[in-house]
Image (cartoon, grey):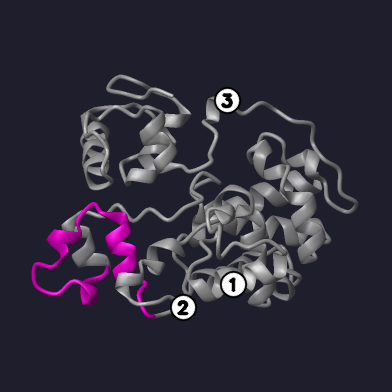
């Protein structure tokens, strides 16, 4: 792995999304500056070059997009997974059979609603870990109550410190000094967050995601999202139909509002058509 000024491609896009830089797929001065800031905040040599050490710390246990090869489309009774080829990554399709079996995704309507929400929340199935690499200004705008005065300046571009503070003493996490806010930060396609949620998911899935929280991002990004759907009674809402009103109802349960509704509707129509054609 080597990304630097002048590089381009899918891995650069993934890097930019992780760092909160416009994901244009070209490694320019802004990306270089963001890399340097992240490296410095995470104890790495801040040379602006993404080698194996930087990449592996940014994306634990991940595989660069360029090295992922195509796999045969799995078959699941009642689901037209072959229709999804070219619409979502093969790595996502490969996760569907096991996820569908565990969480009752029994028809194409449910699957289309589910994937539409996952696709939007993860930026096209690319983000599997919460991006907390905020500048001092962004911290003031997004988390104003946690950063009074000029406190934001000492937390800027330090994801571990930021998450440890804003997620402290809630969702089952310990206080800021425990750093559990960072350990149990958002992961998966619909951002499983907080120790209590990781604990509940671990009990359901049968693997210790409390001791190994990165598993949610690397092994269970889709299953953790389905766990959210299951826990929040979303399948019955999905069953209402294939209209915009149903997508809106699902969105309100996932998002708490209707942020990104147009994109979610667009995703749903694309996936539903692909699954039912």
Q: Write the start and end of the magenta stretch as one range.
A: 143-169
Image check: 176 left or right of 85? left
In the rendered view, tell whether residue 177 sits above or below residue 62: below
What mark, if any, has residue 22 been given in the picture?
Answer: none
What mark, if any, has residue 171 been given in the picture?
Answer: 2
Disc 2 secondary structure class: loop
Which residue is painted at 36% across and 38% down in the image? 16
In the rendered view, tell whether residue 221 sits above or below residue 231: above
Mark 3, residue position:
67
Mark 1, residue position:
199
Which residue is painted at 30% across and 19% down in the image? 6
Disc 3 secondary structure class: helix
Give yes or no for residue 159 being in the magenta stretch: yes
Residue 173: image location, x then y, percent: 43, 75
Q: Measure how far apart labels 2 and 3 are at the Cα level.
A: 37 Å
Answer with mark 3 or mark 1, whichever residue precedes in sequence.
Answer: 3
Corner quadrant of residue 134: bottom left
């Amino acid at each position: 792995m080597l990304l630097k000024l002048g590089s381009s491609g899918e891995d650069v896009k993934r890097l930019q999304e992780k760092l909160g830089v416009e994901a244009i797929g070209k490694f320019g001065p802004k990306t270089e500056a963001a890399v340097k800031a992240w490296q410095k905040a995470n104890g790495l040599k801040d040379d602006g070059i993404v080698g194996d050490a930087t990449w592996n710390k940014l994306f634990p246990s991940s595989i660069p997009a360029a090295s992922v090869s195509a796999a045969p489309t799995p078959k699941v009774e009642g689901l037209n997974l072959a229709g999804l080829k070219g619409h979502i990554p093969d790595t996502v399709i490969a996760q569907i059979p096991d996820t569908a079996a565990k969480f009752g995704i029994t028809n194409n309507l449910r699957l289309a609603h589910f994937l539409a929400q996952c696709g939007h929340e993860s930026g096209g199935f690319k983000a599997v870990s919460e991006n907390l690499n905020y500048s001092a200004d962004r911290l003031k705008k997004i988390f104003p109550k946690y950063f009074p005065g000029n406190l934001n300046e000492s937390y800027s571009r330090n994801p571990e410190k930021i998450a440890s503070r804003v997620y402290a003493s809630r969702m089952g996490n310990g206080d800021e000094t425990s750093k559990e806010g960072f350990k149990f930060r958002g992961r998966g396609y619909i951002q499983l967050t907080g120790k209590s949620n990781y604990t509940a998911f671990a009990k359901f899935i049968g693997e210790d995601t409390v001791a190994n929280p990165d598993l949610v991002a690397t092994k269970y990004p889709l299953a953790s999202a389905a766990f959210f759907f299951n826990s929040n009674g979303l399948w019955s809402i999905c069953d209402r139909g294939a209209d915009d009103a149903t997508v809106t109802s699902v969105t309100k349960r996932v998002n708490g509002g209707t942020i990104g509704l147009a994109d979610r509707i667009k995703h749903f129509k694309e996936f539903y058509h692909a699954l039912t054609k």
